[in-house]
Image (spheres, rainbow, N blue to C red):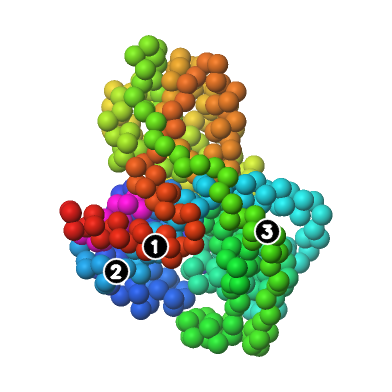
Amino acid sequence: MMGLDTAFFAATAAEAEQRYVEFGNAITRYRGDRNKVTANHRNVSRLSPAIRHRLITEFEVIDRTLTNHAFGQVEKFVQEVAWRLYWKGWLSLRPQIWRDFLDDLAELQHGWATDRIDAIVAGQTSIEVMGYFARELVETGYLHNHARMWFAGWWVHVERLPWQLGADFFYRHLLDADAASNTLSWRWVAGLQTRGKSYLPRRSNLEKYLADGILASHGGGLEQLNNPRAMIADEDELIRSREITRPFLTQSSHEPRQQSKRFGLIVHREDLKPEAGPLQHAKPDSVLVLDHRSQGEQAGDSSCKLAWITTAQTDTLKRLTNYYDTAQVSLGGFLPIDQQIRDWCSEQQIDQVSVMRPEVGPLADALTATFDELSGHVTVCWVDRPEDLEARQLATGGFFGFWKKYEKLLRQRNRAG
């Protein structure tokens, strides 16, 4: 068993801070070492779960890195952090991709024979290292990004399984999975994100970057990857996916109305650090930290993922109890999201709520539906970090077009600072 050590994947704000400090000592070596897949993953930051849930934000990581190092020394690391911002911004402008994915997934789950998939999830594969990766994911909630690409490419182009089912497998187990990065990465591997580009796992690439110990123990069957052939992408889907269907979002005021009786703040797993951002000066009467265990169990999230988010939301409760010291801060019970919010609004007599806007995905779906039901009684203000709005406006095309503009912005900001 590979096991899960929550300290290995920082699950509190303090652990995330310490992990960043430790990795900062080796960050200039990231460019040369990042593609190497080892058993201990010491050549990458292992901060991705904390960044994804914003126990430490992308912007904190980027700004501190550029303050302490020359841009050229750390560009590849900063670029990798920026990929998550890009994916979230891209999907925000095209939410129909998420809805299409959910529709496809529901149809496949009811109509697809699961024996092959069950065997893969259990680590029973003809290419041994793919079984090793499946077990690592299930047991630890993590895979190195290079291993994710190999596994997804094998799933789609070698096993010829639907990419949507692979994306669902990853989403339910990865501690750092968000709807945008996960869904769009799988689409890219399948050739649906960029015309003429898909990702094929090749034996030579695995043998180049896999640690010798992993290869020696799990090298069987790699000959199947000598000459993989790509699935043909759906051209109509490629055309549809480029259409922007939702305009740019703008920041709304999050100051409570003067006529508000009771002003509340809701904190959720998409952004667990409201004290460092637009809500740092908020004066709520009450704060609700949502408990995501019920939603996670219903969605089929793994025990590792549920354990990690439980630790993270408990840490958030403690931090915010101290930070918003004039408010009543509570953790929602083991209940559906909508019931937690309705019960809290009723008990605390809340008539206005501020909440960090979740990105396109299951939480945004749940919160939108809940506040639509409460619209006659509770006013909600969706709050965005200015940095998110800034990055989102640049995500209209491909990543490298985004990066060209975002890099310029970062260099200007770094010089100004």
The picture places residue 18, in percent across and down from the top left corner, at 28, 56
Q: What kind of secondary structure does the magenta stretch mostly adopt?
A: helix
Secondary structure of the residue carrying tag 1 is helix
Disc marking residue 237: 3
Instruction: Give the residue type at disc 3.
Output: Glu
Viewer-side residue, 130 vs 149: 149
Instruction: Give the residue type at disc 2.
Output: Val
The picture places residue 393, in percent across and down from the top left corner, at 42, 49
In the image, the segment drawn in magenta is: 54-67
Residue 118 visible, this orientation: yes
> What residue do we see at 68% from left, 59% from top?
237
Please name the residue that numbered disc 2 is placed on.
74
In magenta stretch: residue 61: yes
Viewer-side residue, 283 vs 90: 90
User: From the viewer's perspective, is residue 116 above or below residue 278?
Assistant: below
In magenta stretch: residue 344: no
Instruction: Give the residue type at disc 1.
Output: Trp
Secondary structure of the residue carrying tag 3 is helix
> What residue do we see at 35% from left, 69% from top?
76
Q: Nearer the viewer, mark 1 or mark 2?
A: 1
Distance from the alpha carbon under mark 2 to that under mark 3: 36 Å
The picture places residue 82, in percent across and down from the top left corner, at 39, 59
Left or right of 254 in this view: 249: right
